Amino acid sequence: MRSENTPFEGGPMDGRVLPVLVGPTGHPPKWYKIPVPPPPDAAPGTPPTVYAYRRVPAGFTKRLGLPRGWRYEYVPGGAERRKLKWPWSKPNGGQ
């Protein structure tokens, strides 16, 4: 598998560059989630903390405006949930 060195901005990974696996299209995943286990002195059953980073273009080419590369930005609220958009669904949730 091919990987690409991708910079991270904001949050606990600020300024780090990690190799991220790219898909068949050559793009890294849209979201990169980093699970951090709870500290040893935490109460039993405490869920791990998950840091979420969203993929954004690092820059654009001058002539065509294509993305020049990718970077990840920290999202403090976590990854937002996406609703499926089916062609036969009514707008606004069918209400």
Image (cartoon, rainbow, N blue to C red):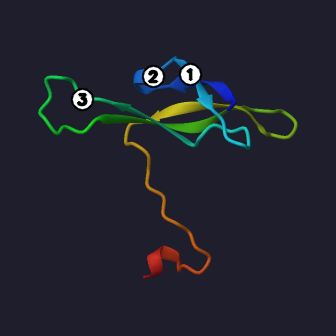
Left of 38 or right of it: where is 60? right
* Badge 3 amino acid: Pro
Left of 62 or right of it: where is 85? left
Left of 45 or right of it: where is 83? right
State how many labels appear: 3
Residues marked 1 and 3 touching at CB (< 8 Å) = no
Q: Quadrant of the N terminus?
A: top right
Residues marked 1 and 2 touching at CB (< 8 Å) = yes
* Badge 2 amino acid: Met
Residue 35, given in percent of the width and then of the height, sits at: 37, 33
Query: What label does residue 18 carry, if any?
Result: 1
Q: Earlier in the sequence, mark 1 or mark 3?
A: 1
Q: Residue at x 62, y 76 (%)?
A: 87
* Badge 1 amino acid: Leu
Q: Residue at x 63, y 37 (%)?
A: 28
Neighbourhood count class around disc 3 (C-alpha, 10 Å): few under 14, some 14–19, many 20 upward: some
Q: Camera-side residue: 45 or 87?
A: 45
Q: Which residue is mark 3?
A: 38
Label 1 – label 2 distance at C-alpha: 10 Å
Q: Residue at x 40, y 23 (%)?
A: 12
Q: Earlier in the sequence, mark 1 or mark 2?
A: 2
Neighbourhood count class around disc 1 (C-alpha, 10 Å): few under 14, some 14–19, many 20 upward: few
Q: Residue furthest right?
A: 63
Neighbourhood count class around disc 2 (C-alpha, 10 Å): few under 14, some 14–19, many 20 upward: some
Q: Which residue is mark 2?
A: 13
Q: Quadrant of the C terminus?
A: bottom left
Label 2 – label 3 distance at C-alpha: 17 Å
Residue 39, given in percent of the width and then of the height, sits at: 21, 24
Relative height, residue 61 to residue 17 (above, below): below
